[in-house]
Each structure stands twice: as C-alpha cells, then as structure tokens.
C-alpha cells in the first residue's frame, strides 16, 4: 500500500494559511509586518479587508479628538482650519488580515502608488503589459484595491482623493466599451491631491550682465578662452543686476495628513554696491532691478556700477583682453592705441564686434573686426577681415566690406562696398556701386554697377568692369529671380500640356456631346425621366469643360507672373546704358574696359588705345539693337 507524503507548508511553493486576524491600528503596514513576522512568512503573502475607518482631528495636544463625518472628510481640503499649525489629523483603521488565496480579478493589473517629494500629489501608475477586464462592481472593487495600496504606503484614504473618483470612472468607461484593455504603454494618473506648500524664497543677487560674459565663452560644448568677455555691453533698459527679495513660504498639508511648515528665508545677498545716474533702480514686490538707462558697457570700480561708452586700450590680444564682442547696438567706442609697427594692435585670430572702433596700429593675421564705424591708421594683414558701414583704412592688404569705404593705399587687398574711394591703388580687387581712385597703379580689378572714375593713371594691366550684379546682394537676388523664372516656365509647360490633352478630348468627343445634349432635351420636353447613365455622362462632359476653363485661367495667371519676373530680370541691367568708366588721365599700357550684360548674356570689351585722352566710356547699341559696343562719349 502506497502512502502519499503530506507536503510541508514551509517547503518552496507551499502557501501557508494563517488564521484571520482583526486589528484596530493607525499603521496598517506595520501590522502586516507584525503578523508576517509572527507567522514567519513574507508580508507580500498577506492581504486584508478594510472593515472600518475613523478620521479624527483636534486643535491642540491636550484637546479631545473629534471624529469627522463622511462629508467633512470629503471636503477636508476646504476646512478653514486645514493649514492651522495646531490642527492634527489621524485615521484609525479596523482591518481583517488574512492569507492571500486565489488570484482576484484585479491581479492582472500591476499598479503602484507614488507621490511627489512633498507627498501632496499621489499618482497611480499602471505598468505596461497590465491587463484590465470589466466585471460587475469593477469601480467599487478597484477603489478598494487602490485604498489598500494607499494604506500600505501610509497615506490617508477618503481624504484629498477627489481626483481618484474621476480616474476610476474614466477607466471603467473605457472598459465598458472594450470589455478588456491591455496597456501597451505605462499610464500614470493623479488620484489624491493635498495642499502643496509655497516654498520659501531665499534672497539672491543675480548678475545678469555676468551671465552674458559666461555665455560668450561657449563654442558649442567647449569653452573658448579667447572670448573672455573683457567688456560686457548693455543696451538701454537692459536688466543688469537683479536682487530677489526673501519671502517666507506658506504651509501645506500632504496626503498623509502631515502639516508642512515653511522654513525661514536665508538673507545674505542684500545689495551694498552703489550705482551711477546711468543705471536705473526699480523696486517691485518681489525684487529690485538695476537697468541700464543708456547703452554702453558695464564697469565696476570701488563697488560702484556705471555705464561707460568709450575705452582706451593698448591692444586686443589673446594675452591681454581676448576677443571683444559688445554687439553693434551698444553705444561703445574703442580706441586701440598700439602704434609699434612690429606689433599688432589687433592680435592674431582676435575677433572684435563693437559700435565704433579707432585703431592706431595694425590688424594681425586671421583677425576679424565688425563695427558700424571703423578707422584703421595702420595696415591690415592679408588674412584679416574688416566689416563696417563707415570704414577708413590707411594701408589695406586684407578684405574689407562696408557701405562708405575710404582707403589711403590699396596693396593687393579686396574691397566691397556701396561707395569706395581709394587714394592710391597698387593691385587688388574692388567691387562697389561707385568707385573713385585718385592714383591708379597696375593690376587692379575694378568692378562697379554705376561708375568707375580714375583721376591719375600711372600703370597698366587694369580691368574696368561694369557688372549690374557685382555686389553679393544683387547677385543673390538675380540668382533667386532666375530660379523663379525657370520654375514659372516649367509650370506653364505643365499647364499647357494639360490644356492640350483636354482640348483634344473635347474635340474628339464634340459630336457625342452634341448628340447626348440633344437626347436629354428630348427627354425633358417629353416629360420622361432621363436615364441615369445619360445624366452621368453629361455631367462628365460639363466637368471636363469646367476643368478646361480653370486650366486656361491658371495659365493666364502663370503667364502674368512670368512677365513680372522677366521684367524684374531685365531691370537688373536697366541702368547699364547709364553706367560710365571715366579716366581723367592719358591711357597708358594695356587696360581693358568690359561691360557684362544679363539679357542677352554676353560681355562687351574695349581696350583704349595707348596715349588716348578719351575720358568717358559707355555701353551703346546700334540702331537695329543687335550689336553692342563701348564708345567714348563727350559728357563728363
């Protein structure tokens, strides 16, 4: 006879059943641990039912506890005494603790309770992969399930939980429609909300102008040590310094019923500095603001802040100042005083951006200067770049860009501007609307849109070029317009092909359409119902006609746009016949005059004979308008 061995409840996989225990407690989690310990099992093997909940409050340690009604608990956050420091809250629970048995209908839902740092906002998280199935009484069962999770987390139940009802109602509605839901993504909803405390604000002194200095150092993720913010610019009304006033916060009460008292503010940053009359002090409820009353740069000497507009410095170099960027809007003038011919006033690789700069010496290799107004008394290196609306350079070998540019001596440099004046040119390239050269040497390329004028010609191998789109802005505008013309022509071709297709269909079906129209009229006169196939076919003919008219209208619009673009294209060289090349001296050696045309796209050139005294040259065309040539004219 075989006997089956009885399974030891302590063996792996066995479920040990305990006798149900009813307790009254304020800490359910602690009681679960106690019961688990006494039975030598894990608290995770236990479950419980909530039999009764008592919510009580009192206004002093010695006062009697007062039990709250259901309505008072539901409206607890509106209790006028809720933030009173003397008010105390407690909940007493009567629970029945027992062993977990068969899986319940909610066990397929893996949920967790979490809260923010203050425990004033409590969230229910449903993990991805969880499955919920609707059953009769789902809402009440789910509410009890959540409340048990809250008690394990030592949170109050029934109090502050107005959001929970809405969350459960929403989930139940989804389940009633779908019967079951598998959560493909994690979902998190608010289920309880206490009264969040307003945090205390400690005083702070924010040096906004210093932040600009620090931001200027960043080059992507790296720190550019050449940009040390030697000067920090300020424009009118810019916030320079801000003092945040201290303010004690206000109390709150979290979802455990605990009162959260604010800390006393820390005060250690009160402003003790002075300011000049160029800085405005404005006090508000929350802060004190110090704003610039005019543009310039910020200075601080002897604990007094000021706005200055002009500075004298010896040099701008990596060693002394680093690059300087005060922007073009701030009213700042820099005077760089270094004049030693063996040193650079603007050092190698330095970048300067300022409203106005006056440089007594040289600009070194790889340096860049941007300003509204710039004067360079020394020379520019071949790899240096200068950008300024009003620009004056003594000896220029690098690149210069401006509106009004004046150069004393051009030595193989590049210049671009609206109006460029050069006293002496010995090689280089000039691009402008108007160019004036007092003394022209050799190997200079001058390209202008309106006028090139030379007072004295001392060399040869020079190029005098009239080009309507010599400047970058004009060239870009012309390229954009040409692209639009190309697109407009393509669009017209497409519409014309579409029109041709529908016109061919219309012609080939003209007889059938006339016959169909005649038959429909006969049906109408006879009072008979017209066959649906006839009506459908007739409507198709009408739609084709309407579409054809729409295409013709579209074609007209596109042709008008092409005309406008073409007119704009011709306008780029509309003044080319007014442009002039003027030389007030006798022509020497080989020098070429060239006019570049856009429409037709061609170049017309002329080499003035040596020793010729003809001074003014313009583009002309013959009476047939087929041949273009350059001619000497009488007018100056």
Image (cartoon, rainbow, N blue to C red):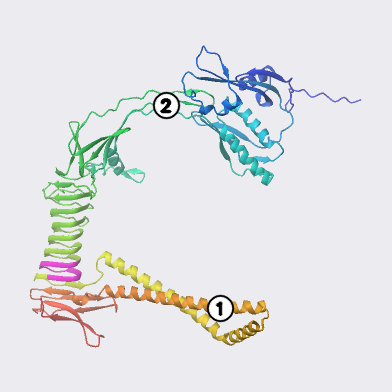
Residue beneath disc 2: 250
Give me the residue at 18% from left, 55% from top.
381
Residue 247, percent across and down? 36, 27
Q: Main secondary structure of the magenta part?
A: strand
Which quadrant holds residue 404?
Answer: bottom left
Closer to the camera in the image, 359 or 468: 468
> Is residue 262 highlighted in magenta?
no
User: Looking at this rendering, what residue extends furthest in the top direction?
Assistant: 62
Residue beneath disc 1: 542
Q: Would you say 286 lies left or right of 54 here? A: left
Give me the residue at 89% from left, 26% from top.
2
Measured along the vertical axis of the image, is residue 616 above or below residue 8? below
Residue interval drawn in magenta: 432-453
Give me the residue at 49% from left, 81% from top.
500
Q: Residues within 10 Å of mark 1 (few under 14, many from 20)?
A: few
Closer to the camera in the image, 435 or 103: 103
> Is residue 439 highlighted in magenta?
yes
Residue 65, percent across and down? 56, 16
Closer to the camera in the image, 147 or 98: 147
Closer to the camera in the image, 173 or 293: 173
Residue 15 seen: yes
Q: Would you say 255 lies left or right of 265 here? A: right
Q: CA distance from mark 1 to mark 2?
A: 76 Å
Residue 501, percent across and down? 52, 80
Which quadrant holds residue 539?
Answer: bottom right
Helix, strand or loop at label 2? It is: loop
């Amino acid at each position: 006879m075989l006997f089956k061995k009885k399974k030891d409840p302590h063996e792996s996989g066995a479920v040990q059943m305990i006798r149900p225990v009813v307790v009254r407690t304020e800490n359910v989690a602690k009681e679960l641990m106690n019961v688990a310990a006494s039975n030598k099992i894990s608290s995770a093997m236990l479950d419980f039912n909530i039999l009764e909940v008592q919510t009580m409050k009192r206004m002093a340690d010695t006062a009697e506890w007062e039990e709250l009604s259901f309505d008072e608990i539901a409206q607890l956050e509106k209790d006028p005494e809720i933030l009173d420091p003397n008010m105390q809250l407690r909940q007493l629970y009567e629970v029945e603790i027992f062993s977990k048995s068969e899986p319940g209908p909610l066990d397929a839902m893996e949920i967790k309770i979490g809260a923010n740092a203050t425990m004033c906002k409590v969230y229910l998280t449903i993990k991805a992969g969880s499955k919920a199935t609707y059953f009769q009484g789902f809402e009440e069962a789910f509410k009890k399930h959540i409340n048990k999770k809250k008690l394990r987390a030592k949170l109050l139940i029934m109090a502050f939980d107005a959001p929970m009802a809405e969350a459960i109602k929403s989930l139940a509605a989804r389940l009633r429609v779908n019967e079951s839901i598998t959560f493909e993504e994690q979902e998190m909803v608010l289920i309880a909300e206490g009264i969040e405390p307003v945090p205390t604000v400690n005083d702070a002194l924010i040096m906004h102008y210093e932040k600009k200095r620090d931001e200027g150092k960043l080059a992507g993720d790296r720190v550019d040590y050449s940009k040390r913010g030697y000067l920090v610019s300020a424009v009118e009304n810019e916030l320079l310094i801000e003092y945040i006033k201290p303010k004690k916060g206000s109390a709150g009460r979290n979802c455990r019923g605990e009162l959260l008292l604010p800390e006393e503010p820390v005060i250690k940053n009160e402003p003790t500095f002075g300011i000049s009359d160029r800085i405005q002090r404005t006090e508000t409820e929350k802060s004190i603001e110090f704003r610039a009353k005019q543009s310039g740069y910020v200075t601080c000497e002897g604990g007094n802040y000021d706005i200055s507009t002009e500075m004298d410095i010896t040099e701008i170099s990596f060693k002394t100042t680093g690059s300087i960027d005060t922007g073009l809007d701030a009213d700042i003038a820099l005077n760089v005083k270094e004049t030693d011919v063996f040193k650079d006033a603007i050092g190698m690789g330095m970048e300067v951006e300022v409203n106005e700069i006056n440089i007594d010496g040289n600009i070194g290799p790889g340096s860049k200067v941007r300003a509204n107004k710039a004067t360079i008394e020394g020379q520019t290196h071949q790899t240096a770049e200068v950008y300024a609306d009003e620009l004056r350079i003594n000896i220029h070998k690098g690149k210069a860009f401006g509106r009004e540019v004046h150069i004393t001596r051009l030595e193989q440099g590049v210049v671009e501007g609206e109006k460029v004046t050069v006293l002496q040119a010995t090689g280089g390239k000039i691009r402008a609307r108007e160019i004036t050269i007092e003394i022209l040497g050799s190997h200079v390329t001058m390209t202008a849109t309106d006028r090139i004028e030379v007072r004295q010609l001392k060399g040869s191998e020079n190029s005098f070029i009239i080009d309507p789109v010599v400047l970058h802005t004009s060239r870009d505008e012309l390229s954009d317009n040409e692209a639009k013309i190309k697109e407009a022509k393509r669009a017209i071709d497409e519409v014309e092909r579409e029109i041709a297709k529908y016109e061919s269909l219309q012609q080939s079906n003209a007889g059938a359409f006339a016959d169909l129209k005649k038959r429909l009229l006969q049906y109408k006169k006879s009072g008979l119902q017209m066959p649906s196939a006839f009506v459908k076919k007739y409507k198709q003919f009408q739609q084709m006609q309407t579409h054809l008219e729409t295409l013709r209208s579209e074609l007209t619009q596109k042709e008008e746009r092409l005309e406008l673009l073409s007119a704009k294209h011709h306008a780029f060289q509309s003044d080319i016949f007014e442009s002039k090349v003027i030389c007030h001296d006798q022509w020497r050696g080989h020098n070429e005059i060239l006019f570049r045309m856009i429409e037709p796209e061609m170049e017309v050139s002329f080499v003035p004979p040596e020793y010729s005294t003809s001074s003014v040259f313009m583009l002309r065309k013959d009476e047939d308008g087929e041949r273009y040539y350059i001619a000497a004219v009488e007018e100056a």
